[in-house]
């Protein structure tokens, strides 16, 4: 189980809350694809010949790519890696980039078979708060056009906990999502990260701060509504109908291997993690030097255990002590059982045989529960 992630860092403007590596300047836009192709060639042995089940074009704003550029990248991957014929190929997209003609061309002329549309909200005041380029009407039109073009594997992103988002408006966002019949939803709490524009604006009292109690209420409504409409809550922030789980993101959560190319992209092969430089000028120097600038970390046994706990506990598959015993040994199993008991007694974790999963109450504290189980 392996995947390839391609980071396209270009954006029309920076969203206030975003802490991903992106660039507004289009200075390197023309030559960037060629550097990506060279990096793919250099890294072709990283996954050791494993079949590629997913290709994910993320960012940034991958929907800024032309149809020809998308085809060029995917064809290059297929020439270098053993790509499964039924591989999931996802394009992240912003509503303002996807005209009806662009959507139809992507469907007809590229191997992309899954769209991930960054809606965030259907309400303009929320989009203004987030500094998104599109408006609610554009988001609706893009979804309609994508469905009409024949895309049936679509996911959208919705953010909750936005200060301008009332409970009534949040329910309307969810109702619109369900009305479209889209099979997958990624929904995240608005997080104010340091060094973001939003963090600075809130600190200067120029924007309203996030209300944690409001965020909790939104999350509880999200759980209630998705359950009512038959969606499986298979990861803390992800909900899907059966058969439409994100195969690419599941690789991350289930400990699979993946190669990331492009500035700031991360890779993982089971025993080590590496990440490219988050600097466009330095990354583009690869054109001349032929050596990608990256850092590498060989994971200790404790770190591998912590990684398993952190990712698996976020999913409906949960943490399995049989897996811990087989992979890490009895000391780790004992450590896990000793530290998980408190959360089971508090009804934040459910034990079913050897498998431990978060309850709805526990999902509100997922990161803290995982951290309490770590070894150091």
Image (cartoon, helix red, strand yellow):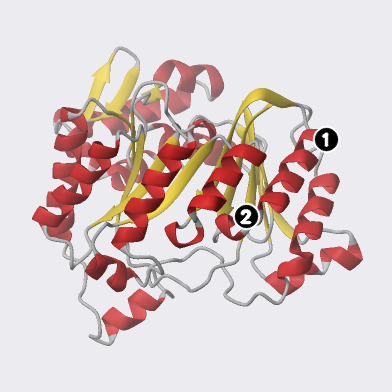
Determine the CA span between mark 2 and mark 1.
19 Å
Q: Earlier in the sequence, mark 2 or mark 1?
A: 2
Image check: 66 left or right of 346?
right
- The residue sitting at 50% across, 29% down in the picture is 254
Q: Nearer the viewer, residue 25 or 150?
A: 150
Residue 265 visible (yes or no): no
Q: Secondary structure at mark 1?
A: helix
Total numbered badges shown on the rendered structure = 2
Residue 37 placement (x, y as % from top left): 80, 51
Return the x and y of residue 212 as percentages of the image width and height.
17, 60
Marking on residue 79: 1
| Image coordinates for residue 98, horizontal then vertical, percent | 49, 55
Q: Is residue 147 left or right of residue 9?
A: left
Q: Residue at x 68, y 24 (%)?
A: 84
Is 325 rendered above or below residue 214?
above
Q: Nearer the viewer, residue 167 or 277?
A: 167
Q: Residue at x 71, y 69 (%)?
A: 29
Indicate which disc residue 7 carries: 2
């Amino acid at each position: 189980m392996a995947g390839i992630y391609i980071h396209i860092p270009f954006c029309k403007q920076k969203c206030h809350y975003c802490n991903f590596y992106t660039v507004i300047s289009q200075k390197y836009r023309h030559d960037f694809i060629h550097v990506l192709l060279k990096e793919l060639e250099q890294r072709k042995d990283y996954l050791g010949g494993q079949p590629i089940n997913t290709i994910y074009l993320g960012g940034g704003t991958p929907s800024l790519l032309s149809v020809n550029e998308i085809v060029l990248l995917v064809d290059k991957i297929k020439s270098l890696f053993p790509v499964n014929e039924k591989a999931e190929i996802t394009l992240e997209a912003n509503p303002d980039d996807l005209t009806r003609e662009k959507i139809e061309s992507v469907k007809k002329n590229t191997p992309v078979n899954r769209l991930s549309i960054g809606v965030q909200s259907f309400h303009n005041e929320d989009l203004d708060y987030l500094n998104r380029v599109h408006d609610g009407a554009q988001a609706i039109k893009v979804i309609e056009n994508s469905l009409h073009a024949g895309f049936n594997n679509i996911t959208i992103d919705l953010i909750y906990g936005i200060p301008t988002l009332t409970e009534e408006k949040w329910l309307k966002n969810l109702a619109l999502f369900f009305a479209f019949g889209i099979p997958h939803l990624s929904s995240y709490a608005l997080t104010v990260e340091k060094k973001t524009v939003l963090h600075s604006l809130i600190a200067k009292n120029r924007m309203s701060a996030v209300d944690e109690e409001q965020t909790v209420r939104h999350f509880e409504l999200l759980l209630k509504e998705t359950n009512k409409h038959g969606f499986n809550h298979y990861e803390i922030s992800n909900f899907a109908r059966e058969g439409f789980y994100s195969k690419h993101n599941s690789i991350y959560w289930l400990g699979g291997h993946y190669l990331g190319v492009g500035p700031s992209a991360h890779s993982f092969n089971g025993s080590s993690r590496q990440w490219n430089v988050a600097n466009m000028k330095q990354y583009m120097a690869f054109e001349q030097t032929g050596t990608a600038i990256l850092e590498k970390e060989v994971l200790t046994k404790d770190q591998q255990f912590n990684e398993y706990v952190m990712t698996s506990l976020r999913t409906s598959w949960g943490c399995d002590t049989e897996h811990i015993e087989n992979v890490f040994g009895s000391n780790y199993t004992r450590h896990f059982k000793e530290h998980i008991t408190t959360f089971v007694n508090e009804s934040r974790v459910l034990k079913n045989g050897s498998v431990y999963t978060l309850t709805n109450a526990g999902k509100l504290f997922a990161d803290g529960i995982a951290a309490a189980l770590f070894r150091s």
